[in-house]
Amino acid sequence: MKYLRKFNENISVYNPEWEKFLPETMVVLKGQDYGLDKWNYKKGNIMLNADMLQISYFIDEWMAPDTLEIDIYMVKDDAYEERGDSTTIKKSGVLDYYGGSGKIIPNLRLTVDITFGDEMACEFTIDRANGVRLFQDTTYNSKFDPSNTVFALEDESLKDLIKFLNRFNHGIELKLEDFKFLQS
C-alpha cells in the first residue's frame, strides 16, 4: 500500500529516498481584490505519520501566507464483500472480472488536502474506481468560498505535483485535465 513507483522498483515511503521526487518549488496563483498574486514556495519540512505524508513549502515574502502544505492520506481500501456480479463496484474497490473470480482488487485511495496559509484551499481523493474526485475548493464558483477569487497552481507546478502523485500505485494515470480545479 505505501509504495511509490520508480521505473521497475518500489520505494517505501519509509525510505527517505522518495523525497527527491517532490517538486523543489511550487508556484501559487491567488486572486485578490486588486489582481492576481504569484507566490513562489520552496520545499520545507516533510513528515511521515503512520498513514499520512505532510509536505510543507515555505516562503519569506511580505504579505504572503507563510506556508503551503500538502497532506496525503493513504488508505488501502479493500473492505468489501464478494459478489457474483463481476461488474459491481463496491465502495472504491474494483472487482476482478478477469476469469470471473469475483475477487476484490485492493485499491489504494489517496486523500489530498492542500492548505494555503491557514486556509483549506482544496481537498480531493484519487482512486482507481472514481479517478480524481473534488470535495472542497476555494476558487471561482466554490460553494465554500464566497469571495469568488482564484486559488491555482502555475502549470509547471501542477504538472510536477501530478508527476509526483502518479508515482503512487493507485492504479490510474493522472492527467492535467483531472485537475481543472487547480488551474487558473
Image (cartoon, helix red, strand yellow):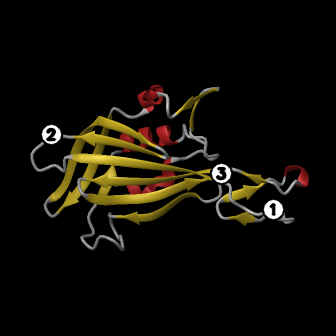
Q: Residue at x 47, y 38 (%)?
A: 164
Q: Residues within 10 Å of mark 2 (few under 14, many from 20)?
A: few
> Which three-letter amino acid code belongs to the residue tagged 2?
Asp
Instruction: Decide which of tag 1 and tag 3 comes sooner along the chain.
Output: 1
Instruction: Decide which of tag 2 and tag 3 comes sooner along the chain.
Output: 2
| Residue 142 % position (x, y) | 35, 70
Under tag 3, what secondary structure? strand
Q: Are marks 1 and 2 in contact (CB under 8 Å)?
A: no
Instruction: Decide which of tag 1 and tag 2 comes sooner along the chain.
Output: 2
Q: What residue does disc 1 label?
A: 82
Under tag 1, what secondary structure? loop
Vertical placement of residue 48 versus 107, above or below: above
Nearer the observer: mark 2 or 3; the answer is 3
| Residue 78 % position (x, y) | 68, 55
Q: Quadrant of the C terminus?
A: bottom left
Q: What residue does disc 3 label?
A: 107
Q: Distance from label 1 to label 2 (Cα)?
A: 53 Å
Vertical placement of residue 37 versus 47, above or below: below
| Residue 75 % position (x, y) | 56, 52
Q: Quadrant of the N terminus?
A: top right
Q: Residue furthest front?
A: 50
> Which three-letter amino acid code belongs to the residue tagged 3?
Asn
In this rendering, the count of numbered labels is 3
Q: Distance from label 2 to label 3 (Cα)?
A: 39 Å
Between 96 and 154, which is closer to the camera in this rendering?
A: 96
Image check: 84 left or right of 19? Answer: right
Residue 60: assigned label: 2
